[in-house]
Amino acid sequence: MYPEAIPLRSTKAKAVIRVLLDFFTKFGLSQEVQSDRGSNFLSNIFQQSLAQLGITHIKSSAYHLEMQGALERYHQTLKNMFHKYRYCLEHSKDWDRGVPFLLFARREVPQERLGFSPNELVFAHRVRGPLSLIKETWSSNLSKSKSLLVM
């Protein structure tokens, strides 16, 4: 799963469609979109937009969050990351600016089941990200301290 999260000021159908179209221009058109039964997803404009793009709309059953279990689990992971990420705490009015950095770090972590990170699966190579930078800095400091021991 390649995680994406896009903060929205409004979750009205037109705003959601705009974001989905932007997403599709980067990753291609989905064959299916799954959503809850929010009024924005059930609106005529949303339904017509998906139909024009040849996308099947799968609606989860009301009050059955387990239908979207992976998504709900990811929401929890993202919320935990926000609580631990200093930028979001220190800049509560601009918290949304921190989202890309959280996602960047999250996409760099290899998935236990697959052994690859979402970035590796999408881009077919390791992307130099925040965790790589930390590792490089740590390795550099470690080799400097070893060379001091040798002298």
Image (cartoon, grey):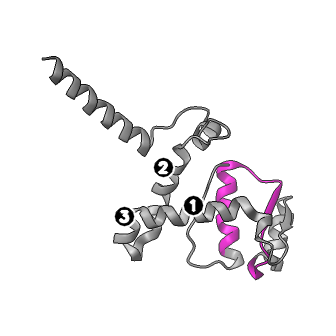
Amino acid type, label 2: Ala
Q: Position of residue 115 (x, y in %)?
A: 62, 35
Name the one closer to the observer, 79 or 149: 149
Q: Which residues are magenta?
A: 15-40
**Which residue is at 51% across, 64% downward?**
80
Amino acid type, label 1: Thr
Amino acid type, label 3: Arg
Relative height, residue 5 to residue 27 (above, below): below
Q: CA distance from mark 3 to mark 1?
A: 16 Å
Judging by the rendered image, the residue that carries numbered circle 2 is 105
**Which residue is at 59% across, 65% downward?**
76
**Residue 132: image tag:** none
On the picture, is 27 further left or further right than 61? left
Q: Earlier in the sequence, mark 2 or mark 3?
A: 3
Name the one closer to the observer, 126 or 150: 150
Judging by the rendered image, the residue that carries numbered circle 1 is 77
Q: Residue furthest front?
A: 149
Q: Position of residue 11 (x, y in %)?
A: 65, 77
**Which residue is at 45% across, 55% downward?**
101
Q: Earlier in the sequence, mark 2 or mark 1?
A: 1
Residue 150 in the magenta stretch? The answer is: no
Judging by the rendered image, the residue that carries numbered circle 3 is 86
On the picture, is 11 further left or further right than 37? left
Could you tell me which quadrant the C terminus lies in?
Answer: top left
Q: Are marks 2 and 3 in contact (CB under 8 Å)?
A: no
Q: Are marks 3 and 1 in contact (CB under 8 Å)?
A: no
